[in-house]
């Protein structure tokens, strides 16, 4: 039986497109000191510190080598990790492992990116098989555009639905002071944006952002002593696959890592009606078709029903099942912290501390997801109570 | 396998990775002082008073935010050194050259930089050094051309 783990401190920087007056370390320090202040703890209380970020996105790898003194990791156990887009959620999960195992009582996990300073597309292209995929599926967008077309083909989802998703996200981000793109767009505005890779136009793709997020995680005994509002990490699932067309989940025998993650998580927690038993979902939604398509893949709604929920307005902040009320990855994508932000924002919703973007439903349980690497999935279930 | 050994297929590629690096809030002031005034400065922690050279905006000793730069004389002592003989595309200058670990007066931490203006056989740990600045400076660490015997 593993130890229970709670989120007891949440910190994030504001997010933006450029911030040349701070360095990577200063960005991280900002999020770390906010998380420690939220937990009312000091860096000396942290038994382990872990850092997540994308290799080469800032033009340097193993960047904890020059950041451990800024993150507070120096002199403590921990490591730097990169699992692509899931790196942030994986940091939360790694923190969970370290506490659930009984090894530590307090861990600090950090995700960050300074996306404007390096070559994201060349860096991300290096993850693919050079002999087979690399010339075609350039950067992150190649795979995401192809799965979007396939989704439109099988479900009846139209470009306009993706535009509705982005318009909704803009309304949400406008209420989140830490979001990067806070401009409000109408469906018509989104439809007029420049095409990048069909069917994804510029506004249907996530931006390149910079920012950092940090969480303080605690064991049950510690959390009960120090925290008035612990958010429990009830369960999580990670599913990996390999890059390549066959693994995108296209065709008759469709299988994706999200489908596997949703099936496992809901079965293990006896969740039969996810839209009732969880009250909000902070989804890693890096392109506008992600929300309808992945609600179906995570088994939260029936196949071909995702875009109908958008038509009904059900996924808005004040809707029946709010998805990404922070504005999501569609409005803020500092990759190394994007998936950790999902966990942080879901936890803020449970605490009732999301401010202007707090959803109107009472939140007892929340979902948070990560997506990236080679179409990998992390799905986390957070809860107000331990059981 | 024998046939493949005769003609294995290799895919040759390259990756272009230009990048920028924001040196940060305090280090920006540090480099501008070198460029404009040929003055070296350290970062002084308001809490534990540790002086970091080159400056850091977070104290490595007590994790406090550091916002103050204190001017240093630039004079220092050679802690240790080596002579570089091999060539690599990432080197800033052509070998052979000497690099030393130098602790400046008033600083609690040391910097690695070039040692010049001296025959390599005369370089000794403990020797006093001073910076030699380039005539044309661009607000980076190579605005100091090297440290020479003082």
Image: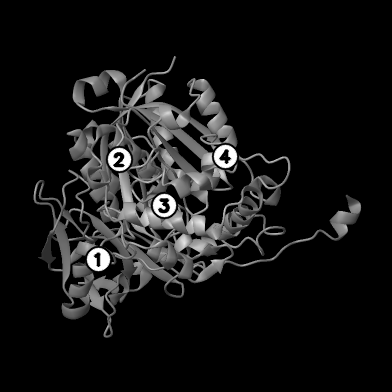
Protein chain holding label 2:
A
Protein chain holding label 3:
A
Q: How crowded is mark 1: few (under 14 residues within 10 Å), some or many (20 or more)?
A: few
Residue carrying label 4? A297
Residue A67 visible at all: no
**In the depicted view, which residue is nearer to us: A373 or A286?**
A286
Point out the tag, 2 or 3, that comes first from the N-terminus. 3
Q: Is residue A238 left or right of residue A185?
A: right
C-alpha distance separating marks 2 and 4: 23 Å
| Secondary element at image label 2 | loop
Q: Residue furthest front?
A: A312
Point out the tag, 2 or 1, that comes first from the N-terminus. 1
Residue carrying label 1? A21
Q: Position of residue A300 (x, y in %)?
A: 51, 35
Point out the tag, 4 or 3, that comes first from the N-terminus. 4
| Secondary element at image label 1 | loop
| Secondary element at image label 4 | helix
Protein chain holding label 4:
A
Which residue is rendered at x = 65% and y = 61% of the image? A134
Residue carrying label 3? A329
């Amino acid at each position: 039986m593993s130890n229970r783990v709670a989120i007891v401190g949440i910190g994030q920087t504001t997010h933006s497109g450029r911030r040349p007056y701070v360095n990577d370390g200063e960005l991280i320090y900002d999020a770390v000191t906010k998380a420690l202040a939220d937990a009312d703890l000091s860096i000396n209380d942290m038994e382990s510190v872990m850092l997540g970020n994308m290799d080469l996105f800032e033009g340097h790898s193993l960047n904890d080598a020059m950041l451990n003194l800024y993150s507070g990791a120096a002199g403590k156990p921990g490591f730097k990790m990169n699992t692509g887009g899931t790196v942030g959620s994986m940091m939360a999960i790694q923190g969970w492992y370290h506490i659930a195992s009984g090894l530590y009582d307090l861990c600090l996990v950090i995700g960050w990116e300074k996306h404007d300073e390096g070559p994201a597309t060349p860096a991300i292209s290096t993850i693919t098989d050079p002999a087979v995929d690399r010339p075609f599926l350039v950067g992150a967008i190649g795979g995401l555009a192809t799965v979007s077309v396939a989704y439109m083909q099988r479900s009846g989802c139209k470009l306009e639905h993706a535009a509705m998703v982005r318009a909704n996200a803009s309304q949400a981000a406008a209420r989140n002071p830490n979001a990067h793109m806070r401009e409000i767009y109408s469906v018509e505005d989104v439809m007029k944006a420049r095409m990048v890779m069909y069917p994804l136009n510029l506004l249907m793709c996530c931006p390149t952002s910079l920012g950092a997020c940090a969480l303080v995680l605690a064991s049950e005994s510690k959390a009960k002593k120090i925290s008035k509002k612990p958010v429990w990490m009830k369960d999580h699932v990670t599913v990996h696959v390999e890059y390549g067309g066959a693994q995108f989940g296209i065709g008759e025998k469709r299988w994706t890592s999200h489908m596997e993650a949703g099936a496992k998580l809901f079965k293990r927690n006896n969740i039969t009606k996810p839209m009732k038993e969880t009250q909000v979902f902070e989804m890693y939604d890096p392109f506008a078709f992600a929300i309808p398509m992945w609600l179906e893949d995570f088994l939260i709604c029936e196949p071909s029903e995702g875009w109908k929920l958008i038509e009904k307005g059900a996924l808005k902040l004040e809707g029946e099942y709010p998805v990404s009320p922070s504005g999501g990855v569609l409005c803020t994508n500092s990759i190394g912290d994007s998936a950790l932000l999902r966990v942080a924002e879901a936890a803020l919703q449970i605490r009732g501390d999301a401010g202007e973007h707090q959803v109107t439903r009472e939140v007892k349980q929340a979902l948070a997801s990560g997506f990236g690497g080679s179409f990998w999935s992390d799905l986390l279930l957070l809860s107000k109570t331990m059981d | 396998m024998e046939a493949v050994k005769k003609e294995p297929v290799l895919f040759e590629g390259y990756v272009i990775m230009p990048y920028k690096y924001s040196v940060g809030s305090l280090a920006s002031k540090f480099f501008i002082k070198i460029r404009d005034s040929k003055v070296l400065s350290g970062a002084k922690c308001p809490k534990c008073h540790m002086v970091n050279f080159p400056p850091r905006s977070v104290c490595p000793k007590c994790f406090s935010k550091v916002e103050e730069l204190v001017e240093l004389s630039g004079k220092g002592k050679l802690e240790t050194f080596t002579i570089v003989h091999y060539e690599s595309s990432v080197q800033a200058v052509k070998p052979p050259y000497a690099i030393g670990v130098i602790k400046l007066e008033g600083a609690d931490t040391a910097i690695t930089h070039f040692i010049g203006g001296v025959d390599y056989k005369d370089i000794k740990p403990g020797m006093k050094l001073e910076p030699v600045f380039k005539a044309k400076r661009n607000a980076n660490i190579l605005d100091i051309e090297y440290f020479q015997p003082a």
